[in-house]
Image (cartoon, rainbow, N blue to C red):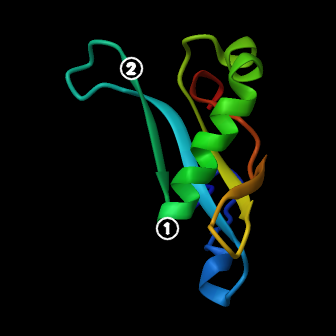
Amino acid sequence: MDQRADKVYRSPMDSGKNSCVGYLARLPRPDQHGTFLYACGIHAMGLQGVIHFVENNLAKLYEEVRTRRFSMAIECDFAPEGHQVTATRGLTPLYRHDEA
């Protein structure tokens, strides 16, 4: 759920499409000593999409957020045969947590 935009995202896979949604964030550690990178998908393909997005956008992500906290939803497309990720894109803006 994108609370800033008040929008709920669901996986297009659930409707038979070859795309899925994932989540990427740098969050505070539970012990409050630093941060950690968190990645997940609604389905396994969503996580693969997040990994693909990071692999292909790492320099830009770092340029935008450095080591600050952020979060964003990512959508990926994948090939029906072999389930290889073919494209990824930000589904939400890159939200900087220090701007909330």
- Is disc 2 placed on a helix, strand or loop? strand
**Which amino acid, mark 1?**
His
Considering depth in this image, is 37 or 2 the residue closer to the camera? 37
The spot of residue 20 in percent (x, y) is: 64, 66
What residue sits right under mark 1 in the picture? 43
Which circle marks residue 35 in the picture?
A: 2
Lateral position of residue 84 relative to residue 70, left or right: right
Residue ranking furthest to the left? 31
For residue 31, what is the image quadrant? top left
Quadrant of the rendering where the N terminus is positioned: bottom right
Point out the image quarter for the C terminus: top right
The location of residue 80, given as percent across then percent down, is 70, 76
Q: Is residue 10 left or right of residue 75?
A: left
Q: Is residue 68 left or right of residue 56?
A: left
Q: For residue 45, what is the image quadrant?
A: bottom right
Instruction: Relative to 9, say whether 70 is above or below.
Output: above
Q: Earlier in the sequence, mark 2 or mark 1?
A: 2
Determine the secondary structure under disc 1: loop
